[in-house]
Image (cartoon, helix red, strand yellow):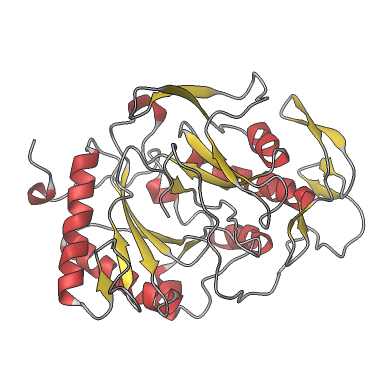
């Protein structure tokens, strides 16, 4: 789901929850007594405390507040998750302006989007961005563990990033194909379309990685990490969506209008815009259960039997599989260029 920095995110609800909790030893289950301890940082399960993270003192409050009533997942557990996943999550946030989805009272309460967060400590970096209406805002950056802990303390659930780094906001580092099913289509149909997208990309000589949205959709991401414009990436994504909609009209749509889309999967090319952001890999979602936008393997997409992952399970996946989204990082070795005919006319 695309989120504009100028508009609040709307919580998207899944039709059903499909996984049972699998708890990492570093993230004890809600039924386990005692404090949560991550990398020697102690997080009480209730009340408040001041913790020191990488030299920054952060006051934690209301740690037993339930953020996900369906499972009892608390603010303390959210902070512990962000600490535990920080080594994998932070490279995907570094130097990327953030729009955060805050749900201070939990996902069943009021949620809102923020770019400039009141009360931000001076050690959290920001970057100035000129919005479409000529208004300049200082967007929050999350470059370290302390920033993640502070954001979690403030009730942040979702982390949405630009597709470009703050140093060059006009140069996206990837192409995104946002696959969004319209009921009765669900994750199984969306996975089928993801495989069709991968085949079409392969015909263009391009590799792609894939992740769940953490809700009902799937994101296919083509790492580029070469000079390119949003006009180029949007034109490429739109043309690919149009080809697949023509070849598979019973399954695929490239039209935003919901009329006539029942049972189909929308391939949304709008995401490729300077004005929109994408949910970061490993970010929690404002779903009934603490689901995470999770990088997956293409074998898992082919199987499609279980593509919903909760916070406690994601850390175990990273320990076992590493960062499946590493090719997206600019520091990675993967460099790809769009086909010359796909670039927009200047």
Horizontally, residue 263 falls left or right of residue 145, namely left
- Residue at image position (19%, 41%) is 231
Name the quarter where the C terminus is drawn: top left
- Residue at image position (35%, 79%) is 263
Please say whether residue 53 is visible from this viewpoint.
yes
Residue 161 position in % (x across, y down): 46, 41
- Residue at image position (53%, 61%) is 12
**Near-viewer residue (83 or 130):** 130
**Near-viewer residue (306 or 107):** 107
**Near-viewer residue (154 or 177):** 154
Residue 43 position in % (x across, y down): 83, 44
Residue 296 position in % (x across, y down): 47, 64
Disc count in the image?
Answer: 0
- Classify residue 254 by image quadrant: bottom left
Q: Residue furthest front?
A: 259
- Classify residue 330 by image quadrant: top left
Name the quarter where the N terminus is drawn: bottom left
The answer to whether 184 is drawn above or below residue 126 in the figure is below
The answer to whether 120 is drawn above or below residue 93 in the figure is above
């Amino acid at each position: 789901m695309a989120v504009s920095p100028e508009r609040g995110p709307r919580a998207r609800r899944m039709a059903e929850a499909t996984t049972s909790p699998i708890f990492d030893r570093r993230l004890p289950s809600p039924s386990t007594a005692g404090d949560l301890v991550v990398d020697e940082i102690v997080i009480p399960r209730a009340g408040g405390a001041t913790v020191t993270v990488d030299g920054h003192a952060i006051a934690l409050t209301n740690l037993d507040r339930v953020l996900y009533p369906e499972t009892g997942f608390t603010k303390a557990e959210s902070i512990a998750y962000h600490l535990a996943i920080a080594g994998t999550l932070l490279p995907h946030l570094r130097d990327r302006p953030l729009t955060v989805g805050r749900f201070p009272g939990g996902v069943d309460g009021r949620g809102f989007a923020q770019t400039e967060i009141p009360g931000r400590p001076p050690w959290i970096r920001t970057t100035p961005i000129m919005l479409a209406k000529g208004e300049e805002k200082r967007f929050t950056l999350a470059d370290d563990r302390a920033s993640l802990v502070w954001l979690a303390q403030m009730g942040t659930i979702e982390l949405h990033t630009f597709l470009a780094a703050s140093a060059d906001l006009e140069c996206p580092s990837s192409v995104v194909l946002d696959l969004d099913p319209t009921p009765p289509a669900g994750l199984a149909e969306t996975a089928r379309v993801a495989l069709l997208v991968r085949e079409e990309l392969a015909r263009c000589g391009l590799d792609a990685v894939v992740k769940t949205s953490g809700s009902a959709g799937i994101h296919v991401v083509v790492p580029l990490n070469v000079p390119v414009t949003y006009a180029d990436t949007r034109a490429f994504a739109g043309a690919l969506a149009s080809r697949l909609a023509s070849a598979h009209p019973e399954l695929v749509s490239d039209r935003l209008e919901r009329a006539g889309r029942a049972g189909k999967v929308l391939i949304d090319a709008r995401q490729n815009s300077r004005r929109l952001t994408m949910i970061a890999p490993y970010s929690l979602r404002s779903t009934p259960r603490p689901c995470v936008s999770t990088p997956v393997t293409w074998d898992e997409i082919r199987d499609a039997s279980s593509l919903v992952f909760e916070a406690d399970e994601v850390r175990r996946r990273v320990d076992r599989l590493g960062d499946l989204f590493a090719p997206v990082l600019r520091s990675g070795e993967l460099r790809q260029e769009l086909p010359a005919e796909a670039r927009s006319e200047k």
